[in-house]
Image (cartoon, helix red, strand yellow):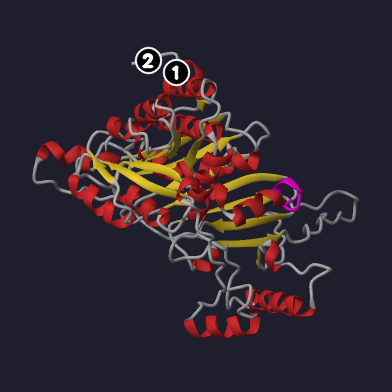
Amino acid sequence: MEKRSDLTRRDAAKLAGAAGFLAAVPGVVKAASDQVRYGLIGTGSRGDYLLSHLRKTDLGRCTALCDIVQEHLDRSAQTIGSNPAKLRDYRELLSRNDVDAVFITTPLFMHFPVMKDALLAGKHVFCEKSLVFKPEEITELRALSAQRPKQVIQVGLQRRYSEFYQAVKSMVDKGVLGNVTHMFAQWNRNPGWKMKPMANPADQMMANWRLYRQYSGGLAAELASHQVDIAEWMFDSPPESVVGVGGHDYMFDGRDILDNMQVVYKYPKKQKLIAMYVCTSTHIPMFGASRSEFGEIIMGTEGSVEITVGDDTHPVLATWYREPAPPPVVSKAADKDGKKAYTAGATMVSASGQTGVPILLDRDKVAANSGFVDKEMKYARQWLYSKGVMMPEEAKNPVDTELQSFLSDCRTGGRPRANLEVGLTDSATVMLTNLALDEDRKALYSEIGVLAGKKG
């Protein structure tokens, strides 16, 4: 695929028509009484990132921040710019009357304790993945939520809020890809998380919490959680079993999590997810090598889709490959006596190659009632997409969409796309992944329920 440049992007805008494609629609300023007042607990890198996106919306107003590190608090207060209260104890934040909802971006081991207290305090909750850390927390959180049905719980799985992932899910459900049997996923890094040295050894583990099992679910929780959620979404089911290999083979800096894993998930309808996570290469065999690190392939009998989520600097990529016509059946000629003639070696049949086409969103599709100018702009964009000059893009980053959807649901009582059950299913699969790798065996999904009854 050709690389896009500023020049081709400008030319494309002229051909496609700037109107309706690049124009931004100004938001309607909400009255203060209509805004959701929220606090954020955990102003580390992820918390600060969410605040940089939350400041773009007028659906809510940040009234309080909490963290145990004053430097993080001061930085995030500047990021959001709403003069929030800066607190060191999250329980103080939860006791405030000017906080309707909370964003929880703490280390994983603190997700459930903070969520529990937030729900008991009557707050709506947005919590980053993985939703919970231990099997027994699944049962406890489900019961707690059932007692408070009017409080919204959303997990931070932003791919659920991507228009392109939603379009692919629609293709799967409508049979466009045929019988979807497999999915491939990877999230490779080189080298991945590095140990940050701390002047005070007592701060070492907490500052590098992702690298210690005491606080973290490792690669399964921090990376694979996004992709197993996609598989559960596309396959309409959690896995029934997990097998895999992994190791602590390349990074020896004091961490005790695995630094690589290769996993196979089996689903009830014989579907499978094959996933890999390594720290020695960023190469990804998708998208014509135009992107690195992470992506997924959804594979069916009539077609496949390569897809990866966008971010602040890279657009989403979503390409559909129709399955070539099945190769002709080759029968071996009979010999003169009517007996089969056998030849040594394998019989090989070559199938034609595939040409990928960009997946179009509704705004790029030509409708029967479209006006002349609208049709011409859409045809022009489709032609440019086919040449690789430009690619279809979402109207906004899915992170913005998920955050704004949460704030809206807090007001309307709506049900999030990434709701409680989505988050709990995802968390259970993360736990199952670590169980299979730690014990070097096939782990069954049914074991999660058993483990949930064994506290401690």
Q: Residue 112: give x, y in percent of width and height.
A: 38, 28
Q: Is residue 166 above or below residue 352?
A: above
Circle 2: residue type: Lys
Circle 1: residue type: Leu
Q: Residue 21: give x, y in percent of width and height.
A: 61, 73
Secondary structure state at the residue bearing disc 1: helix
State the image quarter where residue 24 is shown.
bottom right
Give the number of the disc on residue 455.
Answer: 2
Is the N terminus in the top left, top right, bottom left or bottom right quadrant?
bottom right
Q: Is residue 236 above or below residue 161?
A: above
Secondary structure predominantly adopted by residues drawn in magenta: loop
Residues rendered magenta in the picture:
172-177
- In this picture, residue 298 sits left or right of residue 172: left
Residue 146 is covered by the magenta coloring: no
User: 60 or 88, which is in the foreground?
Assistant: 60
Q: Is residue 378 above or below residue 428?
A: below
Circle 1 is placed at which residue position?
451
User: 407 or 103, which is in the foreground?
Assistant: 407
Examine the rendering and report whether any part of residue 213 can be seen.
no
Is the C terminus in the top left, top right, bottom left or bottom right quadrant?
top left
Q: Is residue 417 above or below residue 420?
A: below
* Residue drawn at 78 percent across, 57 percent down: 326
* Residue drawn at 20 percent across, 43 percent down: 69
| Separation of marks 2 and 1 at Cα, in angstroms | 8 Å
